[in-house]
Image (spheres, rainbow, N blue to C red):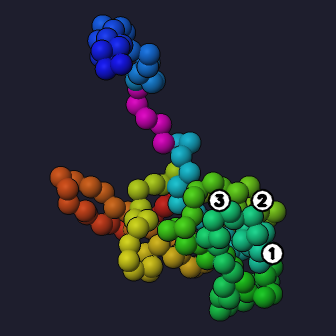
Amino acid sequence: MVLSTIAEAVKYLFKRPYTRLVPAKTGPFKADKMRGAHILDMSKCTGCSMCQLVCPANAIDMVEVPGQYPQNPRRRFPRIDLHKCTFCALCVEYCPFDALYMTSVTGFELYTRDKSTTLKSPVELSRGDYTLVTVKRDLYVIKEVKASG
């Protein structure tokens, strides 16, 4: 029993591997198709809560924002918790007024004990301000970046 197992292992030592390197051709990584930072156009949002209803991760809740918005009399806008978000873009796809969209900006801080950096209010979403984390030699350097689509 043991000898047959050893013989089988030795046989596979001299065979070519079954796996291939993927991709076969290497090239620069294109980030233009990546789903990243959310941007909210508050002038288009009507507060219909469709984004909240379709979010599979329950990362979106509707909060009231002070101010006057003629298209949104209840003044309810989406707030997104990036810690919970899976970046599936269903909220963007189902928004009937195209008020929510995503940019290709990635690399922002998603895990932290303090929710102040991952919980984005509607005003922060409309400005596109994100805290990005870049890693340089095992040191985390945090910088503020304005996301642009």
* Camera-side residue of 141 and 20: 20
Classify the position of the N terminus by image quarter: top left
- Label 2: which residue? 94
49 to the left or right of 148:
right
* Camera-side residue of 84 and 132: 84
* Camera-side residue of 51 and 111: 111
105 to the left or right of 134:
right
Report the residue that reaches farthest toward the left. 137
Q: Which mark is residue 101?
A: 3
- The 10 Å Cα crowd at callout 3, few under 14, some 14 to 19, many 20 or more, is some
The Cα atoms of the two marked residues, 3 and 1, are separated by: 16 Å
- Label 1: which residue? 48
Q: At 81% across and 79% down in the image, what residue appears?
A: 71
Q: For numbered disc 1, what is the local secondary structure?
A: loop
Q: Is residue 6 magenta?
A: no
Upstream in sequence: badge 3 or badge 2: 2
